[in-house]
Amino acid sequence: MRKHSLFNNQKTLSNSARLLSGSFHILLAAISLFPVSIIAQEDTLHVKLSETEVLGHRNEVEGQSYVKLRGKALLRAPLFMGEKDVLRSLQLLPGVDAVSDGSSAPSIRGGTSDQSLLLLDGTPFFNASHAYGLISVVDANIIESAELFKGVFPGQYGGRLSGIVNLQTRTLSANKLHGGISVGTISAAANLEVPLIKDKTYALFSARKSTIDLLLKGAAAISDDLSIPQPSFGDVYGKVIHKFSKDNQLSLSGFYTDDHLSMSSKDAGYRMKYAFSWRTYSGEANWKYKLNDRVYLQSDFYYAGLQNKSKTYIKDKELNIDETQVSKIGEFSLRQSLNWRLTDHLVGAGIAFSQTHFDPIRIESSFGNTAGSGSSSRDLSTTAFWLEDRWSIGSAWSVNPILRATVYSNRTNVRTLLDPRLKVNYQLDHSNSFEANFNMSSQPIDLLRQSSLNFPMDFWTPFADDKIARSGLISLGWKNTFVKNTEFMIEGYYKRIKDQRFIYSFNDFVNYDGGSVYLKGKAYGIETSLRWNPAPFQLMLSYTYSRSLSKLHNEWSGNYQDIPHRVTLWGDYGFALRKKKKANLSFLLNYHTGTPFVLPEGFYPSVDGSHMVGSIPVLPNFRSKRYFRLDINYSITRQLKRGTGTWQFAIMNITAHRNPYMIYHVDKGYKMMVMIPFLPSVAYRFEF
Amino acid sequence: MSKIFIRLLSCLLITSCTFDYDIKDTGYLFTPKIVVNGLISESDQNILYFTQSVPKMSDRLKPIDNARLILHESNQLLLDSTFIKLDTLKLDFPFRTGREYRIELHAQDHKVHSSAVVPFPHKLKVDTVSRMSENNFYQRDFWKVTVDLQTVSPGNSLWIKGDIYNGDGTIDRRYTLEYKGVVPFADKINQEIVMGLEGGLYYNGFIRIGKQYLSDIKKPFEFGMNNIYYGKHIKLQFLTVPESYDRYLINCYEFEKMYLQDLDPPSMFNSSVPIFSNIEGGLGLFSGVQSYSINLENPYYSDDSDDI
């Protein structure tokens, strides 16, 4: 195999060269500035910019701390209860965990799930989970790529300590109708991409609805028992993109998710209904404009919210109760960014303003009184400025300094924080690259959970006491692709956190603004992964050593995210069954050190002497036995006249290993609850 | 709200299971801590309790050896004594309303301390106690209580709770009074919705009306008491509870839900929450309280009530 330097030190971003026959390694340096595509035509390679992505989009350098999963990588990811799940797929990567089986939200590098900023096309969504955490709220069929930032955050993003997940919906550039319909064990979904005006206007729609509630409604009808719980969930997404010209594009999108659980009872003379609902909603307008060949502008406006509601309705001859309890968070934001391309630099700058309103608990009651509030409503204003540069030094070095300044205000306190960030990439040769990260960030809001599941009473609350949690992270990584079809990565990191508010008692917090402590934190670890892709196989092995510690009363101890050893092995094998029919067999193995829990570490009599109570620590004092889970998926895809049809069969936890989700005390000892036992599922999807 | 959450949990159980769990191999270090418990009031006799925490719920409690106890009322010294073994201390004097009391205990090279104020009481009057019947499948009797809240003590919550007494005068811990009815803005901590029962708002064990809701109660309110078959006597208490005791009682309730009730599995809404303590350096609670109680005789009680 011969090696040629075709494009070294070129100052232009498009080029072509005549090639001799044979096989080549293609090394594209300075690709951080703009995405490139490579087209082979006979003996010539054309390297050109991607037209649609030039409009203000900044491509990150993929490495250890920044990962972007695209198209097929997402589609071939494992299934969760027959559903493709982007957030779950990210949890295959080293340094990204689900803290428990009942959580879709990722925990990044020892952080809590609320320390991860979850974005859909740059707009935050405050609830990640459908069905009590089993699957995520975003339908994977509308997602084109998923970006994970666990090192340096881009300048335009902040407000979280541990990481950022940005899911990008499909970009819609083809002038043909495309879509799909699927029906599975727990949900049915449809998505459609429509060119409305050729080369100008495109639309993307998707809708998903749970199917498990239909089974339960049927059971209720057959048994005539209205008190059978009726859980359901659904989500809707829509986006329209209009291109005024090649350099001027507007997109409008909306996202709505709903989880619902209700029970009712009815008899002569009385009627009762009790219902919970979780709702996430957002609307976004995004305008990209190319001012000239060097300057690109992007304007964003969004409103995003979360509403959790419980409703009680009771009516009989004595009572007439109609009471609704609502927790809400709503945020609107304006963001203006600018990218300016120079010869070896891509300079970015911007300003963002957001206003967030928190309604922790509001009660609307038929008693005629205005609602008493256990915790009054609160506001948070955030104004951020950022400046960054992506500087390519020769063909090997890329330096990305970022400075973000943020002003936070919560009615009573105003804090101004500076978050410097720096990312350095060094491409030693075609198979070795190194990366160093320094990242500072701040988080002015905390999630108040009543349990590790997300339930209606969960809500967010802004900072108090003039303290805002801050984190600083350094990391160093090496990526090697020397062996054919393999990619090896290793990265070490160290993170410190200060003023992290940990709310351990929901009721105490709601009633007295108590039940919380400020902690110092530190997390460190080593993440490794090995990918082996000799088609039609794909194999990925990752191992993470990570510690996540908190300091309380001058003592360091492991927190709820402290899981030192974690191994993930994922494999996929695609093969043809016969003409127009192919199959995929894949597996996912998860193994990690036991999960931290809190158990009473002593007992003493209650103040009235009536019973014993437990001495329960704030931080975990107990670790369960090791976690092990093996999932297997098998899919068969058949080419049909007007598209493809795919059967997907999946079994989660095929060995039926008992991984505790919850450990609790009973008369003669302890018991555990397992969220995912041996769990088969099936789904069918038709795409055209 | 436990019953509603049992229902909710049943949804989760579609995909989940429960199993025994052995924690022998994953034990943790136990360190005994000094426990001080004392509810002080205007009563002529107040009792303070002292002990050490134990590793198991069934372990026998131990007194505190060689303990020096100091008690102040505002800046005036009330007590400074050393005890060879200290477990219970009866004080034959009332604690005065509005005064601050400070307690210090020196033992085992440790000092634990706390302070408390006896709150001004909520002034209320129990107007009527009458027997009612539910005319449904369960055909249950309950007592309807009407309470006129006349003056609210600012900053203090109201707890309504009753104890069932056996014929020999001991409290029957097997049965908890269940309260039915509507108390505007009553706390949702132990509120239950019972499907299939008429008039379905229930409060299991107690009714708490948080301090922020009390001023909204403009007129007499009513509630019902169930489970009245099981005791010969019922003592109904109205407690004026300051912040520290309120937080403690809420946490104790959460602990009971998680660890002491026979829910298997317990509600997901319950979690292992540290129990509030205002004993610096130790465990327990030292708090003031005001109590107003009425005693009710149960004409329907019989020795074979257990079979009902």
Image (cartoon, coloured by chain):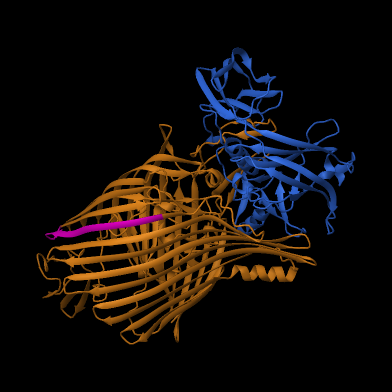
Chain colours: A orange, B blue
> Is residue B114 depicted above or below B246 in this figure?
above
Q: Quadrant of residue B103?
A: top right
Image position of A296 with respect to A547: above or below: below
Where does the magenta region start and end? A380-396
Place of residue A138 in the rendered image (x, y in percent of width and height, measured from the top left):
45, 66
Q: Nearer the viewer, residue A673 or A279?
A: A279
Can see residue A536? no
A385 within the magenta span: yes
Residue A508 appears at what percent x and percent y?
55, 43
**A605 w.r.t. A378: above or below:** above
The answer to whether B130 appears left or right of A509 in the picture is right
Which residue is at the front of the view, B64 or A638?
A: B64
Left or right of residue A292, residue B305 in this image: right
Residue B92 within the segment the image draws in magenta: no
Location of the C terminus of chain A by quadrant is bottom left
Rendered-image quadrant of the N terminus of chain A: bottom left
Q: Quadrant of residue A361?
A: bottom right
Q: Position of residue A283 (x, y in %)?
A: 42, 70
Image side of residue B157 versus residue A49, left or right: right
Residue at 52% from the left image edge and 45% from the top image edge: A509
Question: Where B109 falls versus A222 (above or below)?
Answer: above
User: Residue at 86% across / 33% down in the picture?
Assistant: B167
Which of these two is toward me, A189 or A342? A342
Number of dots carrying numbers: 0
Q: Quadrant of residue A535?
A: bottom left
Residue drawn at 36 percent across, 81 percent down: A202
